[in-house]
Amino acid sequence: MTKPVTFAICGCGARGLEAYAPYQEQHPEEMKIVAGADVRPERLRMLHTQFGVPGNMCFASDRELLAQPRLADVMIVATQDRQHVSAALAALDKGYHVLLEKPISPNLEECRALQKKAHETGKAVVVCHVLRYTKFYAALEDLLRQGAIGKIETIDAMEHVAYWHQAHSFVRGNWRRSDETSPMILQKSCHDMDILRWLAGEPCLQVQSFGSLDYFKAENAPAGATARCLDGCQCRDKCPYDAEKIYVTSPRTGIRGRGASWPCGVLASEPNEEKIWNALRTGPYGRCVFHCDNTVVDHQTVNLEFANNIHATFTMSAFTQDCHRTIKATGTMGEIEGDMEQNVLHLRPFGKPEQTIDLQEENGQFSGHGGGDFGLMSSFCKLIAGGGTAGLTGVDASVESHVMALAAEASRLDGGRTITLSDF
């Protein structure tokens, strides 16, 4: 590359500023952030101090940013779910390429409108289905395409959300209500719908889904539970969802162990322990998980049939210890099983010794989503620098996964009715 691709960012939250922007720090020859927008002044200060964006290029809203002449090659749209399409359409009209945080929208007509606009403008619109950019899923897809297990017959995938992640994002947090954001099968698991479509290699024909919000409801609150964890709750010692455990004392997620990164960075900008305590006393993340206004499911299953007679199942569960994904594919000549957290695939050709494929980096370090966040940024920068528009997770591919997820949610709400996607 002769010069870096320039970026502006709509939405300097956990994804825009903490997942994608840091690629600039390691690869300044590929990426340069020149402008950004957020409604929170403290996030704009981080944009200025950490990434060197001039103060006059830090805007107080996406509308203000998009009112300017085109300032960069690319607009990253990482606002809340229902704000994505309006910002992306405006960015395309200004002449930007668009890197869009998933999901596109919970409204299928908005998804189609963005798809249409992308084709009309001839600009790249790439959706952040970051799992395709991991070594784990890329290696799995390559093995399947090579015929390592013969003809694929079934794929079984599971998203282990983790009890603390469910409490953080989908009970207390930003994505707790489908009427304000998206149904969970779309918001959290459109990644998985995209991966299943990619691995199957043919369009999905039918879906059927079951699931519910079963546990995180007021009627399941134990005796002695209070509306906020720090308000004298008598159940805290035995409750794994206690806010102090998750955000303060946990070695994996708390400010004392994890430090200022996610999830504590969602509670306060540049968090320290004092800020976290204050957030738990006054903000949404200090609420009892049984006394929130959440509506999204805490578990869901989906059955899928693809055009090449591959059948797949997907399970999403809040009730897991760890936050990771597992998958198993069976074929006429063998099977493959893998765990994304371990970054290992087990290939078992029938009648032959098992092969263990270790995809772990030598230093054991990955960016977010098993290296997918930086894998996406690397691929996208090369695409734009090379004058291309057809990314691995372009809007056409993404809309397919959105149709699958939205049809699954419609099935769930209708008692598990089988839905034919062409009709949907």
Image (spheres, rainbow, N blue to C red):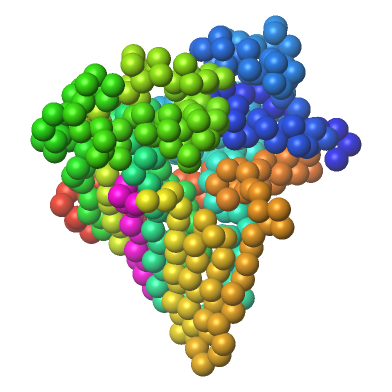
Picture quarter containing residue 362? bottom right
Residue at horizontal 32 percent and vertical 23 percent from the top: 286
Q: Nearer the viewer, residue 283 or 256?
A: 256
**Relative vertical location of residue 205 with respect to residue 125 in this rendering, above or below:** below
- The foreground one among 92 and 301 is 301
Q: Quadrant of residue 220?
A: top left
Coordinates of residue 388 in the picture (x, y in percent): 72, 44
Please name whichever residue, 363 or 11, is drawn nearer the observer in this view of the structure.
363
In the image, residue 93 lies in the stretch drawn in magenta: no
**Is 244 on the left or on the right of 146, as rendered?**
left
> Does residue 178 appear in this view?
no
Q: Quadrant of the N terminus?
A: top right
**Spot occupied by residue 324 in the image (x, y as percentages of width and height):** 46, 53
Q: Which residues are magenta?
A: 304-320
Q: Position of residue 177 (x, y in %)?
A: 29, 30
Q: Is residue 136 above or below residue 82?
A: below
Is 305 contained in the magenta span?
Answer: yes
